[in-house]
Amino acid sequence: MKTWFHSWRAAIRIARRDAWRAKGRSALVLAMIALPILGVSAFDLTFRSAELSPAEKVDRTIGAADARFGDPQLGGVPILQDPEGETGVPARIRDDEQWPSGATDVTKAIPAGSTVLTDRVGSAKLTTVHGLLLTEVRELKASDPVARGIMPLLEGRYPEKNDEVMATSHFLETSGLSIGSTLSARNFEHPYRIVGSYELPDTLKTDQVNALPGAFLAPYAKAVEKAGLPAPDSSVSYLVRKPGGFTWNTVQEINTKGVLVASRAVLLAPPAAADVPSTSGRTGATTGPGPRAGPPSSPRSRPSWAWRCWRSASWPVPPSRSAPAARAASSAWSVPTAVPAATSGRSC
């Protein structure tokens, strides 16, 4: 009784002889089959190895903190936000009311007993080997355990004194400076020594300099104003660590104080869709506990949201605001992103 093996044995023997007689053709056929498979496999492996887990993404934006608090510039009115903290609107507003705007004192919403780390972002024209370079300046105590993961150190060390800074590797490459060099800013001759280099893992081409809180931006602004020029904008957010973290219910309670929150617990375990208030657009007055889901259609009534800075270089800001105010709102949440060379260093 013949089996399937006997049926195929003759065909396999003929194919083997044919392949052996035409070695070049056989090698070409194998290459045409193998190379695309190898290429697709290599691409898939590279893509998957570069893909971050949710926990890694959170570490790069809020470090080891439990949440990042920021000002959505809505005048402190109660707000509704999505779980990611990317969009939101005032909880209640009528069609005949102008969209609220203005600063909010975020510190009043931070729970007592929390560990708080200030993260302020601005910009300055720094002196380099090649001339002036508009650079992002970030005041964050990067060596603090709460900030772990935001600014991975490459060489040297973190700043320990007010006249020390560290810089991204891209800034050092662009500026021609190195660890041990000194830098200063236009209209601000106070020298700072570069003691280390770091990277922003999601935005490797960012020109950024890091200093201790209060060591650069405030004195630089005073020097610029003394020179008769407008002080550059800056914005601030707060990395907060609290026992127990911040649940979705806690985030919503803080929203009633007009403060936007990106919570580690919520980002890693988002709430069910039924528990998230709608923030889609609609007109008409709102009453009761339901949200006003969107702003009126007039341009000056559009909301300003400052949360996308650590995720994207493009955010919606209200046209009615001045450009400096828009830039300040844009950088309120910064993990700063790369910007074109013509505007390198501008806060988001």
Image (tube, helix red, strand yellow):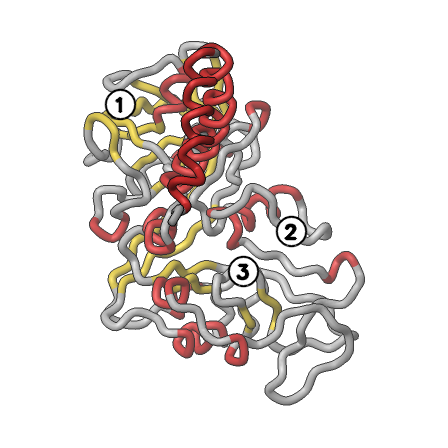
Given this view, does label 3 or label 2 mark the residue nearer the observer? 2
- Gap between marks 1 and 2, in whole Å? 37 Å
Q: What's under tag 3, amino acid-wise?
A: Pro
Residue drawn at point x = 36 percent, y = 51 percent: 53
- Which residue position holds label 3? 72
Side (left or right) of 74 relative to 109: right
Q: What's under tag 2, amino acid-wise?
A: Pro
- Which residue position holds label 1? 193
- Gap between marks 3 and 2, in whole Å? 12 Å
Given this view, does label 1 or label 2 mark the residue nearer the observer? 2
Front residue of 155 and 164: 155
- Looking at the rendered structure, the secondary structure element under dot 1 is strand
- Looking at the rendered structure, the secondary structure element under dot 3 is loop
Residue drawn at point x = 71 percent, y = 67 percent: 295
Which dot marks residue 316? 2
How crowded pointer 3 is (Cα within 10 Å; few <14, some 14-19, many 20+) is rated as many
Q: What's under tag 1, amino acid-wise?
A: Arg
Locate residue 202, reporting x and y percent: 42, 39
